[in-house]
Image (tube, rainbow, N blue to C red):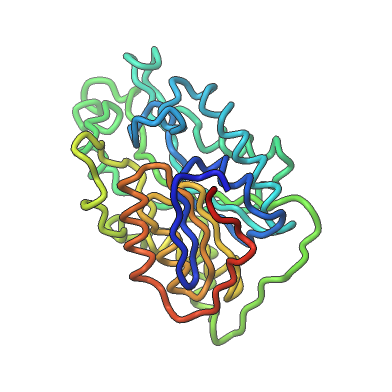
């Protein structure tokens, strides 16, 4: 396994390194579900590493690198099982892009997976308060003065999305639930195409992992979003992967819910905080990670 460091506990293994390099060391068809929030090309600075996809100068460069990850995800995923990514559309600025509008990052991600044979399986919109967005970003399209001065430039707020792609191939193992563990009222809430009840503050504490020159993340992944994906699309004991583990939110939820977790994080401070969060989430369980190789 090509990585800088790793931590293994009862129910998880966390790698410090480049996600593509690490995934190349994972066994074929070893992952039952993957959920993550991908980095944004040139929009948010995660680290100074040249291996950080967030440091790509253009969307074209980002997706050239991202394609290597999707290729590895196709190999490590169980056939017919799901990969969910959390994302949003990008606001375009006149200074950076030459126009004011939106860029379809969500659609670009979908097409990157489809190019590797993944099937566009599901999508839900996660509602976000446009007033909060206006106060935070001062976007021209959300300002009330634009309604008065030139409402042709007005637009709606930008929601988050949870997009789910299904790995190609015939499904080898079903995901099942009982009426008791997944009641109909729970399903009706999750089946909604718009989730209006996600608390934007429902995230792990990350302040201790931030460094002086870090920027504020514009699309944090809430724990309830992760919980709904893991609960619906996995069985207890399944292996959940996040190639962009951050401070360990996906692993924290997965371990708490009795799943196994494989995480990869490139940034050292995030890796260290993720390790603490995963240790905090650990419960007594059999260690099923003997098949995953150690760092060399």
Residue pictured at 60% horizontal, 47% vertical: 23
Q: Residue furthest right?
A: 170
Q: Is residue 233 above or below residue 150?
A: below
Q: Give the x, y percent position of residue 35.
A: 52, 54
Residue 135 drawn at (x, y percent): 19, 39
Instruction: Give coordinates of residue 212: x percent, y percent.
Output: 18, 38
Residue 162 sits above or below residue 286 on the image: above
Res 186 visible: yes
**Relative to residue 176, is residue 58 depicted above or below?**
above
Q: Image quarter for residue 150?
A: top left
> Which residue sits at x=36%, y=68%?
279
Name the residue at 58% across, 48% down.
Answer: 1
The residue closer to the viewer here, 183 or 234, is: 234
Q: Residue at x 53, y 68 (%)?
A: 260
Relative placement, left or right, of 218 versus 75 is left
Please indicate whether residue 254 sits to the left or right of residue 177 in the image. left
58 or 213, nearer to the observer: 213
Q: How many numbered circles does the render carry?
A: 0
Q: Quadrant of residue 134?
A: top left
Extreme residue in the bottom direction = 180
- Can residue 161 be seen in the rendering of this structure? no
Q: Residue 77 location, x and y as percent? A: 67, 54
Q: Is residue 66 above or below residue 254?
A: above
Q: Nearer the viewer, residue 242 or 116?
A: 242
157 sits to left or right of 62: left
């Amino acid at each position: 396994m090509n990585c800088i460091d790793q931590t293994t506990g009862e129910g998880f293994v966390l790698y410090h390194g480049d996600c593509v390099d690490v995934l190349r060391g994972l066994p074929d068809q070893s992952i039952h579900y993957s959920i993550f929030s991908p980095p944004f090309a040139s929009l948010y600075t995660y680290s100074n590493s040249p291996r950080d996809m967030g440091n790509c100068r253009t969307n074209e460069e980002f997706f050239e690198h991202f394609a290597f990850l999707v290729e590895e995800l196709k190999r490590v995923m169980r056939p017919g099982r799901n990969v969910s990514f959390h994302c949003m559309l990008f606001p375009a600025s006149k200074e950076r892009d030459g126009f004011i509008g939106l860029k379809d990052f969500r659609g670009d991600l979908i097409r990157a997976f489809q190019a590797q044979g993944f099937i566009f399986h599901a999508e839900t919109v996660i509602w976000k308060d446009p007033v909060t967005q206006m106060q935070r970003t001062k976007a021209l399209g959300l300002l009330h003065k634009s309604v008065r001065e030139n409402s042709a430039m007005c637009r709606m707020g930008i929601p988050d999305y949870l997009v789910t792609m299904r790995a190609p191939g015939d499904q080898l193992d079903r995901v099942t639930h009982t009426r008791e563990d997944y009641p109909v009222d729970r399903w009706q809430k999750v089946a909604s195409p718009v989730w209006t009840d996600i608390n934007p503050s429902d995230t792990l504490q990350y302040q201790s992992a931030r460094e002086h020159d870090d920027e504020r993340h514009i699309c944090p992944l809430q724990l309830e979003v992760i919980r709904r994906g893991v609960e619906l699309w996995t069985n207890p004991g399944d292996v959940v992967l996040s190639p962009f583990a951050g401070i360990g939110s996906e692993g924290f939820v997965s371990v708490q819910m009795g799943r196994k977790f494989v995480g990869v994080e490139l940034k050292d401070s995030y890796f260290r905080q993720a390790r603490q969060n995963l240790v905090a989430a650990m419960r007594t369980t059999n260690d099923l990670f003997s098949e995953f190789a150690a760092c060399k």
